[in-house]
Image (cartoon, helix red, strand yellow):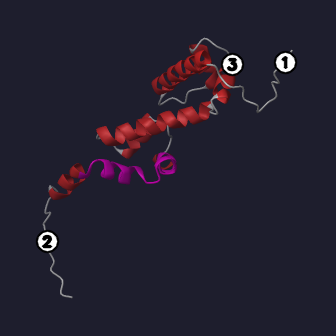
Amino acid sequence: MTTISHKPGTAQPLSQGQLNLTQQVLTQLRHYILQQLPQAPRLSDAARALHMSSRTLQRLLQQTDSSFRELVCQCRHQLAQQYLQHSTLSLQQIAFQLGFEEQSSFQKAFKCWQGCSPGVFRQRKSPTAARSQYLSAPGALLQVNYGIN
């Protein structure tokens, strides 16, 4: 008879059925997190909403090499990208919508996620908006400089 060791840190391969169920729970968990923002979601509340114990949810996340905190960060990152691309919300409003207490905290987190500031990301994703905003600025002049080499 073969016994399976349940030592911490040793992940057991998941069957296809377990994998499908895990993905379904992760999808529901992401949806729950997105619904809770801007309030910081708690693992215990999420587990209750998914009709499981906190420990079961932690084990499930551990099997996928993830954590509740990582999922919250991923959801915030996803929402931040959407807000920056498709809204006219200020950075301060976006920070609040994502549950950050300070705009500077949001900017620091976004720079870690994306490698650039939220303002730069917004400009890169909407170059025509940035260009039209510059051209429509009061007193904006187009100037061509011809340099002599």
x and y, in percent, of residue 87 in the image: 30, 38
Query: Magenta segment, which residues?
Result: 106-127
Task: State which tag comes first along the sequence, 1 or 2.
Answer: 1
Residue depicted at x 68% and y 25%: 13
The amino acid sitting under disc 3 is: Thr
The residue that label 3 is drawn on is 56
Horizontally, residue 70 falls left or right of residue 55, namely left
The residue that label 1 is drawn on is 2
x and y, in percent, of residue 55 in the image: 71, 21
Question: Which structural element holds mark 2?
Answer: loop
Task: State which tag comes first along the sequence, 3 or 1.
Answer: 1
Horizontally, residue 121 falls left or right of residue 66, namely left
The amino acid sitting under disc 2 is: Gln
Contact (Cβ within 8 Å) of mark 1 with mark 2: no
Magenta segment, prevailing SS (helix, strand or loop)? helix
Q: Nearer the viewer, mark 3 or mark 1?
A: 1
Name the image quarter holding the C terminus: bottom left
How dense is the environment of label 2, judged by Cα within 10 Å: few (below 14), some, or many (20 and up)? Answer: few
Residue 140 shows in this picture: yes
Residue 141 has which mark? Answer: none
In the image, 7 versus 117, the foreground residue is: 7
Task: State which tag comes first along the sequence, 2 or 3.
Answer: 3
x and y, in percent, of residue 48 in the image: 61, 14
The residue that label 2 is drawn on is 143
The amino acid sitting under disc 1 is: Thr
How dense is the environment of label 3, judged by Cα within 10 Å: few (below 14), some, or many (20 and up)? Answer: few
